[in-house]
Image (cartoon, rainbow, N blue to C red):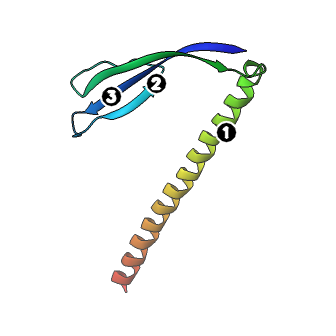
Amino acid sequence: MKQKITIYTQAIKYCFEHKFAIHNSSIKFSTDSTQTIIDICEQEVEIEIPDNCEDNLVEFEVKELEKVRDKIKADAVVAVNNIEDKIQSLLSIENKQGE
């Protein structure tokens, strides 16, 4: 399946930077208090979307959610281990002071 989209090429300079960077996006940005935007051009392009893409979105979402879940679990294990290390360190200091 083919889909037409508009690509906006803009020069963007954030308030904390000294030079512009060229940015291509399907979103047209506007100047605001944090960035200056200069429109360079816009082009309509046609992209090919795999025919079965929509059929697989639920499967892809499940895989992405599993990645998020696994990262949260790993981060939690690290945090718990850090807390356990602090507890053991405090108990060790207390035991040495009590001797």
Between circles 1 and 3, the one closer to the viewer is 3
Residue drawn at 53 percent across, 51 percent down: 75
Q: Is mark 2 on a helix, strand or loop?
A: strand
Q: Quadrant of the C terminus?
A: bottom left
Q: Quadrant of the N terminus?
A: top right
Q: Where is residue 79 in the image (x, y as percent from the top left)?
A: 49, 55
Of residues 68 and 11, the one drawn nearer to the viewer in this rendering: 11
Residue drawn at 67 percent across, 29 percent down: 61
Of residues 27 and 2, the one drawn nearer to the viewer in this rendering: 2
Q: Is residue 44 left or right of residue 90?
A: right
CA–CA distance in space, label 1 to label 3: 37 Å
Q: What element carries label 3?
A: strand
Q: Name the residue under label 2.
A: 25
Q: What element carries label 1?
A: helix
Mark positioned earlier in the residue sequence (3 or 2): 3
Residue type at mark 1: give it.
Glu
Mark positioned earlier in the residue sequence (1 or 3): 3
Q: Mark 3 points at which residue?
A: 11
Q: Position of residue 28 (x, y in %)?
A: 40, 17
- Up-down relation of residue 74 to residue 15 (above or below): below
Mark positioned earlier in the residue sequence (1 or 2): 2
Residue type at mark 2: give it.
Ser
Numbered mark located on residue 66 in the image: 1
Mark 2 is surrounded, within 10 Å at the Cα level, by few (under 14), some (14 to 19) or many (20 or more) other residues, namely: few
Q: Are marks 3 and 2 in contact (CB under 8 Å)?
A: no
Of residues 69 and 12, the one drawn nearer to the viewer in this rendering: 12
Q: In this view, does 36 lie to the left or right of 55?
A: left
